[in-house]
């Protein structure tokens, strides 16, 4: 089988760098929480300084610039160039497709490993209800333009109760676009989603019936597909990435989280203070990472238990994996 679970590793880290929280869209499931993440836009000198804080091991770190909408940042191109100068392992820009500030002409395909587009529906009818009117068209145009300019592109589809019914249409939709990678994400109940209700979450049955099959269909188009493991089999070990991996989620108010599910709370592991990364006092997310519960991930149980099914004896049918545990499917030759 061309499918593998991507093991956590301390040797390969990801730095999710939120340059700003401002955005031109107001997606229904936006995970940004301005109360916790601030509203400021980092100036380029601060961005460079913060990137330099990771310079010692940056050849093992993938940096992902995001927001808000990172292309709204007038100096995103300079941030990319600084990350390149420092020698980060890879550089990605996550965008909602609007590609502000002529970003495709201010960085080159040699400077950016991936431009990653978010699309949450195969049709405008579904996507635009979630992400905003006109957004579907903008993403389609954006991907095609980026590919034509020579950039490597990827796409992120965040699965929820609002759009799982269209996931199976995605392989046909993206045929011929030139996408290299397709990421299926699962909705997190945080930010805006936490203020609505839990019917955004999909059940284990829905997930397992739809997602692996679509991943395979996408892989048959020559695209690498990544999707979260979510439900662990009985024999699989549970591991918390907060302990066994090395991921950093930086926000423009200087908070650094190790776990994305903690981002709605002041539970960050570190704060950036001047030129130093300072550990925060108790209680923070690191106090949760080694707790062992029958349901698997502690934070999942606390903030989004709608995906847990219990047997009649009260034990969970499946443990929920760390949200960062992924399956990767390589292209299938047909
Ligand atoms: S999910 Fe992304 S594109 Fe949508 S409002 Fe939030 S930051 Fe903007
Ligand atoms: S999602 Fe759960 S398992 Fe993963 S880092 Fe967070 S608390 Fe740990």
Image: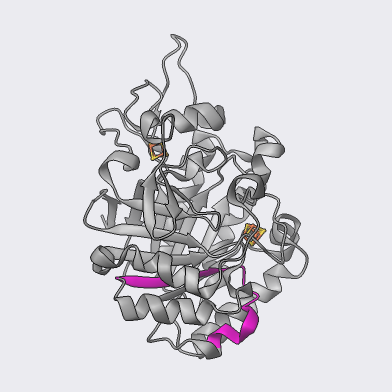
Give the farthest residue toward the top: 313
Q: Residue furthest left?
A: 11
Q: Where on the image, by quarter, is ligand 1? A: bottom right
> Quick one: 160 or 332, which is closer to the camera?
160
Residue at image x 65%, y 45%? Answer: 35
Q: Position of residue 68 (x, y in %)?
A: 61, 62
Residue 334 seen in this snapshot: no
Image location of residue 320, percent across then percent down: 41, 32
Asked if residue 233 shows in the view, the reply is: yes
Specify the segment rendered in magenta. 89-104
Describe residue 132's horizontal placement relative to residue 216 as left or right: right
Relative depth, front residue between 249 and 327: 249
Residue depicted at 40% across the width and 57% down the height = 226
Judge whether 319 appears above or below 221 on screen.
above
Quadrant of the drawing holding the N terminus: bottom left
Residue 5 lies, in percent from the top left, at 29, 49
Question: Relative to 90, is 323 above or below?
Answer: above
Question: Is the image coloured rainbow, by chain, by secondary structure, or in one colour?
Answer: one colour
Q: In the picture provided, is 21 more to the left or to the right than 155?
A: right
**Looking at the figure, which quarter contains the C terminus?**
bottom left
- Image point 57% across, 55% down: which residue? 167
Name the image quarter holding residue 190. Answer: top right
The residue that appears at 47% across and 45% down in the rendered structure is 260
């Amino acid at each position: 089988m061309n499918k593998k679970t991507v093991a956590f590793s301390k040797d390969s880290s990801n730095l999710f760098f939120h340059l700003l929280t401002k955005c031109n869209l107001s997606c229904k499931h936006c995970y940004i929480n301005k109360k916790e993440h601030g509203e400021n836009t980092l100036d380029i000198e601060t961005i460079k300084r913060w990137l330099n804080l990771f310079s010692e091991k940056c050849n093992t770190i993938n940096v992902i610039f995001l927001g808000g909408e990172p292309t709204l940042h007038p100096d995103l191109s300079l941030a990319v160039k600084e990350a390149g100068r420092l020698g980060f392992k890879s550089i990605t820009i996550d965008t909602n497709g609007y590609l502000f500030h002529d970003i495709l002409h201010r960085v080159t395909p040699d400077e950016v490993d991936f431009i990653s587009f978010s699309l949450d529906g195969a049709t405008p009818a579904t996507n635009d209800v979630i992400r905003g009117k006109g957004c579907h068209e903008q993403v389609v145009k954006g991907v095609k333009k980026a590919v034509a300019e020579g950039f490597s592109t990827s796409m992120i589809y965040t699965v929820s109760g609002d759009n799982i019914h269209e996931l199976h249409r995605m392989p046909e939709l993206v045929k011929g676009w030139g996408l290299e990678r397709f990421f299926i994400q699962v909705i997190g109940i945080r930010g805006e989603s936490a203020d609505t209700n839990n019917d955004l979450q999909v059940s284990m049955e829905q997930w397992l019936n739809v997602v692996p099959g679509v991943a395979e269909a996408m892989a048959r188009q020559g695209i690498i597909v990544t999707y979260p493991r979510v439900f662990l089999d009985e024999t699989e070990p549970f591991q918390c990435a907060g302990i066994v991996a090395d991921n950093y989620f930086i926000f423009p108010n200087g908070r650094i989280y190790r776990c994305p599910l903690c981002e709605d709370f002041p539970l960050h592991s570190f704060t950036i203070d001047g030129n130093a990364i300072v550990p925060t006092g108790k209680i923070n997310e690191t106090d949760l990472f080694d707790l062992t519960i029958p349901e698997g991930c502690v934070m999942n149980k606390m903030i989004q238990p709608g995906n847990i099914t219990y047997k009649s004896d009260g034990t969970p049918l499946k443990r929920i994996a760390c949200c960062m545990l992924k399956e990767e499917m390589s292209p299938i030759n047909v």
